Image (cartoon, rainbow, N blue to C red):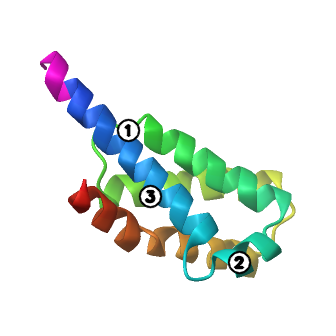
Amino acid sequence: MKKTDKMIGAGIALAAVAAAATYFLTGKRGVENRAKIAAWTLKMKGEVLENMKKMNAVNKEAYHAIVDEVAVRYERAERVSAAEMKHLKDELKGAWGHISKQLVNK
């Protein structure tokens, strides 16, 4: 892989991470999200973002796999109800639409 290809890939991944972070905290429900965010929720979203930075290719399937993987760890480690976790996973997976639009724009 050429150096320029790697740079382009890194730029796209960074754009996806920035889009996800922006959506989570400033989207349509950003004020509501910030008011409701518990410490574990913020840590989980941060971990999803960190894992996105490590991705070579940013696509829906890989993003959903990251969300599922991180959610499993938080279900075990944190005292989270199944309903709360389902809601958060749905929210994170639903953010893909916004993230993918930002990737297309970049």
Q: Position of residue 87 (x, y in %)?
A: 64, 79
Q: What residue sits right under mark 3 in the picture?
A: 19
- Upstream in sequence: badge 3 or badge 2: 3
For mark 2, does the 10 Å Cα neighbourhood hold few (<14), some (14 to 19), or many (20 or more) residues? few
Horizontally, residue 23 falls left or right of residue 43, namely: left
Marks 3/2 in contact by CB < 8 Å: the verdict is: no
Q: Position of residue 24 (x, y in %)?
A: 59, 66
Name the magenta segment's main secondary structure.
Answer: helix
Q: Residue at x 35, y 42 (%)?
A: 13
Horizontally, residue 12 falls left or right of residue 31, namely: left
The residues colored magenta run: 1-5
Q: Amino acid at mark 2?
A: Val
- Upstream in sequence: badge 2 or badge 1: 2
Q: Which mark is residue 31?
A: 2
Q: Residue at x 16, y 23 (%)?
A: 4
Q: Is residue 45 magenta?
A: no
Q: Please state which of residues 103 and 63 is positioned toward the viewer in this rendering.
A: 103
